[in-house]
């Protein structure tokens, strides 16, 4: 098979990376996609760096061995822990990571106050600290660790009392000290945009990095002449380390859910 007709592999600790996959499918509908979620080991964001790196390398090895033309690490936490090791291990593969969309948020809200919601690991790691140091002179960047939040999405819970109670608890302090934007620094959180919006109101911009990653995928594939030549819609296949049909059903539901 031509290399350009191999699938693009998406990887996340669970179902969150589908928030990036859906934008990629919209931008590049003729590609084939294989999405793998490591829900068996989720959450990643409260584990140690070394543990997450091992989990990523182990899960990805057999998937990459099947033949893929690009890897999108659709997870901020896994990117912080493993992107360097993955690029080293697969020097000939296009490997794209995900990071909190602080740059576009600061460009749109110079001098503003920007809240970054992410897992504890993402907010502790070098990648985030470097971004914060780089952009802090241009805006106030406030990290907001959200342990326990991705679990709602993993359970298919994106609205209702339990998740809205969690979010209210986290976001209540910023109702009196208003923020200009909220960066969703975990790929699970875009599925909670509606619930977050109901708490913070219409005037706070909610930003995620999904379009940036999808555009990066398109330009990297184009640069290496690896865009599919097909003109009909490609296939999206889901696999998960949890051996349960329900999780695959949730993946399909999230892919097709209307965006709030
Ligand atoms: N989806 C994830 C992220 O972007 C991680 C969630 C987790 O496993 O803790 O960081």
Image (cartoon, rainbow, N blue to C red):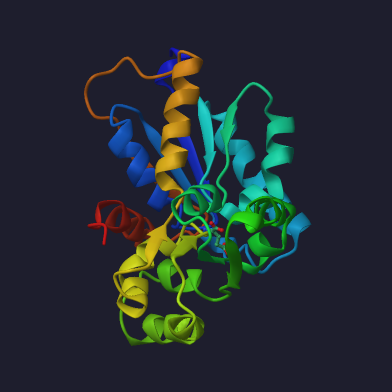
Tell me if residue 157 can be seen: no
Tell me if residue 217 comes above or below residue 35 in the rendering: above
| 226 or 218, nearer to the observer | 218
Q: Residue 32 lies in what quarter of the image?
A: top left
For the point 57% across and 60% down, the residue is 139
Tell me if residue 4 can be seen: yes
| 56 or 91, nearer to the observer | 91
Q: Position of residue 217 (x, y in %)?
A: 46, 31
| 13 or 137, nearer to the observer | 137
Quarter holding ligand 1: bottom right
Q: Residue 84 lies in what quarter of the image?
A: top right
Total numbered circles:
0
In-image side of 145 versus 233 (left or right): right
Q: Quadrant of the C terminus?
A: bottom left
Q: Position of residue 133 (x, y in %)?
A: 71, 55
Q: Position of residue 128 (x, y in %)?
A: 66, 55
């Amino acid at each position: 098979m031509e290399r350009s007709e191999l699938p693009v592999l998406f990887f996340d600790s669970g179902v969150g990376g589908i928030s990036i996959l859906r934008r990629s499918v919209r931008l590049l509908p003729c590609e084939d996609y294989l999405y793998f979620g490591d829900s068996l080991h989720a959450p990643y964001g409260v584990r140690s760096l070394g543990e997450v790196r091992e989990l990523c390398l182990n899960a990805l090895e057999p998937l990459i061995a099947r033949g893929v033309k690009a890897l999108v690490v659709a997870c901020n936490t896994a990117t912080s822990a493993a992107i360097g090791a993955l690029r080293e291990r697969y020097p000939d593969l296009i490997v794209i990571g995900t990071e909190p969309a602080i740059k576009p948020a600061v460009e749109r809200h110079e001098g503003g106050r920007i809240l970054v919601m992410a897992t504890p690991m993402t907010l502790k790691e070098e990648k985030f600290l470097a971004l914060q140091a780089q952009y802090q002179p241009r805006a106030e960047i406030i990290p907001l660790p959200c342990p326990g939040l991705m679990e709602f999405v993993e359970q298919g819970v994106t609205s209702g009392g339990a998740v809205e109670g969690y979010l209210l608890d986290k976001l209540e302090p910023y109702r009196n000290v208003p923020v200009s934007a909220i960066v969703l620094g975990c790929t699970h959180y875009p599925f909670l945009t509606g619930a977050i919006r109901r708490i913070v109101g219409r005037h706070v911009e909610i930003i995620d990095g999904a379009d940036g990653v999808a555009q990066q995928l398109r330009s990297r594939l184009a640069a290496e002449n690896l865009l599919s030549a097909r003109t009909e819609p490609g296939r999206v296949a889901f696999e998960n380390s949890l051996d349960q049909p329900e999780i695959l059903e949730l993946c399909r539901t999230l892919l097709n859910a209307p965006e709030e």
